[in-house]
């Protein structure tokens, strides 16, 4: 199954809601977004992965000291271990890019939740895109069926002329 990378999560953060005539993502893209959320939905990081992410976090703030580094590492690792490795890695990347000071446990949790909710929201939107794709395909098929039922150009002209004469006949009867 086509799984998204951590970078792909960032690229899919702003999938637009489908509109009746707007641009849609492809079914392959939609299925990849849905599969990505399914993969991270119930996942959790290993303690080793969470610890490595915490090391990256600490290393991103050189010269910053915490009161008790062991407690800080345990506190951050305990948050990151609750999330899929892609989410925890992306959260660390997000906080190290956006927090000027060493983040608190709450800030790391918030980053994880934001990424998780965004990927989940994107999966819902991707499902709506798939439904809209299906609706449009049915509409095209219906239009094609209607068009084919009218036959060739000459047959359509003949049928249309017959319908017009019926309408004119009914209109003329109403005038009398």
Image (cartoon, rainbow, N blue to C red):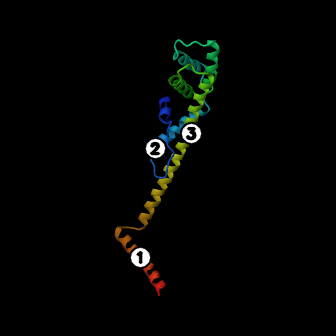
Rendered position, 113 above or below 16: above
CA gap, disc 1 and disc 3: 51 Å
Name of the residue lying farthest toward the bottom: 176
Q: Residue at x 58, y 35 (%)?
A: 117
Say which residue label 3 marks: 121
**Tag nearer the camera, 2 or 3:** 3
Q: Which badge, 1 or 2, is on the more N-terminal residue?
A: 2
SS for dot 2: loop
**Tag nearer the camera, 1 or 2:** 1
SS for dot 3: helix
The crowd level at tag 3 (other Cα within 10 Å; few <14, some 14-19, many 20+) is some
SS for dot 1: helix
Q: Position of residue 83 (x, y in %)?
A: 60, 28
Q: Residue at x 58, y 12 (%)?
A: 65
Q: Is residue 100 left or right of residue 78?
A: left
The answer to which of 79 and 60 lies nearer the viewer is: 60
**Mark 1 near mark 3, Cβ–Cβ under 8 Å?**
no
Q: Position of residue 118 (x, y in %)?
A: 55, 36
CA gap, disc 2 and disc 3: 17 Å
**Mark 1 near mark 2, Cβ–Cβ under 8 Å?**
no
The crowd level at tag 1 (other Cα within 10 Å; few <14, some 14-19, many 20+) is few
Q: Position of residue 152 (x, y in %)?
A: 36, 67
Residue 72 location, quadrant: top right
Disc number for residue 26: 2
Say which residue label 1 marks: 164
The crowd level at tag 2 (other Cα within 10 Å; few <14, some 14-19, many 20+) is few
**Residue 174 visible, this orientation:** yes
Q: Which badge, 2 or 3, is on the more N-terminal residue?
A: 2
Q: Is residue 147 left or right of residue 58?
A: left
Name of the residue lying farthest toward the left: 154
Q: Residue at x 38, y 70 (%)?
A: 156
């Amino acid at each position: 199954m086509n799984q998204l990378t951590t970078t792909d999560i960032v690229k899919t953060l702003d999938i637009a809601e489908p509109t009746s005539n707007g641009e849609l993502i492809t079914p392959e893209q939609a299925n990849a977004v849905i599969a990505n959320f399914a993969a991270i939905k119930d996942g959790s990081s290993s303690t080793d992965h969470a610890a490595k992410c915490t090391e990256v976090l600490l290393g991103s703030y050189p010269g910053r000291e915490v009161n008790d580094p062991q407690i800080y590492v345990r506190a951050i690792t305990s948050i990151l271990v609750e999330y899929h490795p892609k989410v925890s890695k992306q959260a660390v990347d997000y906080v190290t890019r956006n927090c000027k000071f060493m983040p608190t446990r709450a800030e790391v949790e918030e980053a994880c939740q934001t990424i998780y909710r965004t990927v989940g929201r994107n999966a819902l939107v991707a499902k709506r895109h798939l439904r809209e794709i299906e609706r449009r395909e049915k509409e095209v098929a219906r239009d094609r069926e209607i068009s084919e039922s009218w036959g060739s150009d000459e047959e359509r002209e003949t049928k249309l002329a017959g319908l017009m004469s019926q309408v004119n006949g009914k209109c003329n009867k109403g005038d009398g």
